Image (spheres, helix red, strand yellow):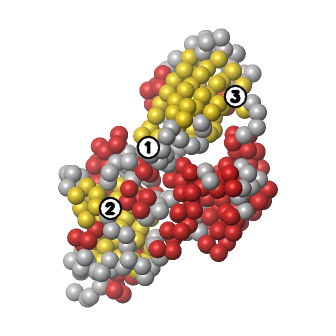
């Protein structure tokens, strides 16, 4: 399956600082003369597709970024072109995930397969593949269990979920060992952010973060992660929800304060997010049940500028009859950053005074919560 654009990780979003030149140099002398390699990544919420053909067996990409960004190399040796590859996205493709960053990334492959390429020298990508290799047995087991769950009955699903929970603990143990053993690595920071999850235990995570090297902690991504950790204290139930203004589907500015006097579920989602679309089915039921009882939903979309049509279509297809806003900046969405959103779907339930009373509440529990706080008709 061709993963053209991996969901961008928020802590790697690019801020408005000075960009630096990056170069990706691929030595692939055995590639066919007609081969084309694509470099796919996201910057400022925009999907970028660059391409290169070889010159004397060398493929070169250049661009400007401010920090390490997760990217994908995809090789086309069949001359079907990028659009052709999109049409065959469910087929297994020759792809390699990696990081690009200011400076030079050098790779070499002795075959006609980019997935077999190896990085020259030490650095971010060598650390990344080192950790991936250690995690591979766990990843493969998780993938197998996920496939089994698609056809499992209720009893087997419970058993398989327990195995997934066990594998998650093993993965976290591996990550923690890597973090503690490589405090000067950017990948240790990356692993820590995944280890921390969307709702970190600050007592546990902050000391681990402080054990990272000064150089790593001074990186823009590390500073954003520290801000994320600090922000958690102001986003818990009992605190006032941060106020914001963002445009709705027609371009009209919507202020959170305009919902004062109602219970509001602030729902972060996107048209490209499968779990979000599944959640929408349940949210529609909840909205229809409680919309006449001083309750509404405010949707915040993390779609990108090139995804506006998909966003509007998803609203119509899913029957989302509540207010929707977005600045169409993907993970750079200003409200998502204000609320330190690191995964979607995610939600905050606020009371008529704008105070957070529940966070990331599951839809199966949301209805019960609303029955507790809303007046009976």
Splitting the image into 4 quarters, where does residue 69 fall? top right
CB-based contact (under 8 Å), mark 2 and mark 3: no
Q: CA distance from mark 2 to mark 3?
A: 43 Å
Mark number, residue 34? none
Nearer to the camera, 42 or 151:
42
Left or right: residue 111 versus residue 340 is right
Q: Quadrant of the N terminus?
A: top right
Residue 287 picture location, percent across and down: 29, 70
- Chain-order first, disc 2 or disc 3: 3
Question: From the viewer's perspective, is the residue at label 1 or at label 3 nearer?
Answer: 1
> Mark 1 or 2 closer to N-term?
1
Image-based side of 121 in relation to 9, left or right: right
Q: Which mark is residue 44?
A: 1
| Cα gap from disc 1 to disc 3, whole angstroms | 26 Å
**Residue 335 place in picture, x, y as percent:** 38, 60
- Report crowding for label 1: few under 14, some 14 to 19, many 20 or more residues within 10 A (C-alpha): some
Q: Which residue is mark 2?
A: 299
The residue shown at (69%, 21%) is 27
Residue tagged 3:
107
């Amino acid at each position: 399956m061709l993963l053209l654009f991996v969901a961008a990780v928020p802590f790697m979003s690019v801020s408005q600082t000075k960009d630096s030149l990056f170069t990706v140099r691929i030595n692939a002398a055995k590639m066919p003369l007609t081969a084309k390699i694509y470099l796919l990544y996201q910057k400022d919420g925009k999907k970028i597709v660059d391409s290169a053909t070889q010159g004397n067996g060398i493929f070169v990409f250049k661009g400007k970024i401010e920090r390490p960004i997760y990217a994908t190399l995809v090789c086309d040796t069949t001359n079907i072109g990028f659009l052709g590859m999109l049409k065959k996205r469910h087929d297994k493709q020759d792809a390699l995930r990696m990081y690009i960053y200011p400076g030079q990334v050098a790779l070499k492959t002795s075959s006609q397969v980019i997935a077999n390429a190896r990085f020259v020298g030490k650095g971010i990508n060598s650390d990344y593949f080192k950790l991936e290799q250690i995690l591979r047995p766990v990843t493969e087991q998780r993938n197998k269990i996920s496939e089994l769950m698609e056809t499992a009955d209720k009893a087997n699903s419970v058993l398989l979920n327990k195995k997934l929970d066990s594998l998650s603990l093993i993965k976290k143990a591996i990550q923690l060992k890597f973090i503690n053993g490589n405090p000067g690595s950017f990948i240790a920071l990356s692993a820590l952010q995944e280890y921390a999850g969307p709702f970190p235990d600050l007592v546990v995570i902050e000391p681990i973060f402080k054990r990272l090297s000064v150089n790593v902690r001074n990186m823009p991504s590390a500073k954003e992660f520290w801000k994320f950790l600090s922000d958690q204290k102001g986003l818990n139930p009992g605190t006032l929800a941060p106020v914001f203004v963002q445009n709705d589907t027609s371009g009209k500015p919507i202020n959170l304060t305009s919902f004062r006097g109602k219970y509001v579920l602030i729902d972060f989602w996107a048209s490209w997010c499968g779990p979000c679309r599944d959640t929408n089915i349940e949210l529609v039921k909840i909205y229809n049940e409680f919309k006449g009882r001083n309750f509404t939903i405010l949707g915040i979309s993390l779609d990108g500028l090139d995804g506006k049509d998909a966003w509007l279509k998803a609203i119509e297809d899913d029957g989302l009859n509540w207010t929707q806003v977005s600045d169409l900046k993907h993970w750079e969405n200003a409200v998502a950053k204000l609320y330190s959103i690191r995964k979607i779907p995610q939600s905050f339930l606020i009371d008529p005074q704008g105070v957070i009373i529940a966070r990331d509440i599951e839809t199966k529990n949301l209805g019960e919560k609303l029955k507790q706080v809303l007046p009976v008709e």
